[in-house]
């Protein structure tokens, strides 16, 4: 996948998942919700099974991902993935994902 294609995919994901409300307190947000969702989905597509796999995916693909994701807070931790995915509305996530 080229960087242009990856960037287009990231923009599309931001639109598709735009209905998901960010459950975090605004002043404590270090990572964008789009980055967390994108990394989580890419990790699962690549065979990841849990929160640590999401973090490891990000670490292993760091240079590539930095070319099209914002990543203002660097690498989200496994705990960050867990907290966000546990708190988003699963029905809304599923509806967005089916789009």
Image: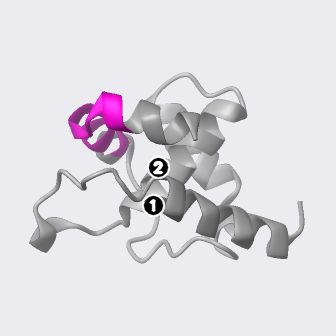
Q: Is residue 90 left or right of residue 18?
A: left
Q: Which residue is mark 2?
A: 37
User: In this rendering, does residue 9 appear at all?
Assistant: yes
Q: Residue at x 72, y 70 (%)?
A: 8
Q: Position of residue 2 (x, y in %)?
A: 89, 68
Residue at disc 2, secondary structure = helix
Tell whether label 1 touches label 2 (CB within 8 Å).
yes
Q: Position of residue 50 (x, y in %)?
A: 48, 26
Q: Position of residue 47 (x, y in %)?
A: 69, 26
Q: Is residue 38 left or right of residue 24?
A: right
Residue 83 included in the magenta stretch of the image: yes
Q: Residues within 10 Å of mark 1 (few under 14, many from 20)?
A: many
Q: Over which residues does the magenta segment extend? A: 81-92
Which label sits on residue 97? none
Residue at disc 1, secondary structure = helix
Q: Residues within 10 Å of mark 2 (few under 14, many from 20)?
A: some
Is 73 situated above or below 12?
Answer: below
Q: Quadrant of the N terminus?
A: bottom right
Residue 41 included in the magenta stretch of the image: no
* Location of residue 94 by image quarter: top left
Q: Which residue is mark 1?
A: 34
Is 65 situated above or below 39?
Answer: below
Q: Quadrant of the C terminus?
A: top right
Our reading of the magenta stretch's main secondary structure is helix
Q: Residue at x 70, y 62 (%)?
A: 9
Is 39 situated above or below 44?
Answer: below
> Label 2 to label 1, Cα distance in Å?
5 Å
Q: Residue at x 40, y 37 (%)?
A: 93
User: Most extreme residue toward the right, as rendered?
Assistant: 2
Q: Position of residue 98 (x, y in %)?
A: 56, 33
Q: Residue at x 82, y 76 (%)?
A: 4
* Location of residue 51 by image quarter: top left
């Amino acid at each position: 996948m080229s960087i242009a294609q990856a960037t287009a995919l990231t923009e599309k994901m931001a639109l598709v998942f735009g209905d998901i409300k960010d459950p975090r307190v605004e002043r404590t947000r270090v990572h964008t919700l789009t980055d967390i969702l994108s990394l989580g989905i890419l990790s699962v597509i690549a065979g990841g099974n849990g929160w640590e796999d999401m973090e490891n995916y990000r670490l292993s693909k760091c240079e590539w991902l930095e070319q099209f994701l914002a990543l203002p807070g660097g690498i989200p931790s496994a705990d960050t993935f867990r907290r966000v995915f546990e708190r988003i509305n699963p029905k809304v996530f599923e509806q967005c994902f089916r789009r």
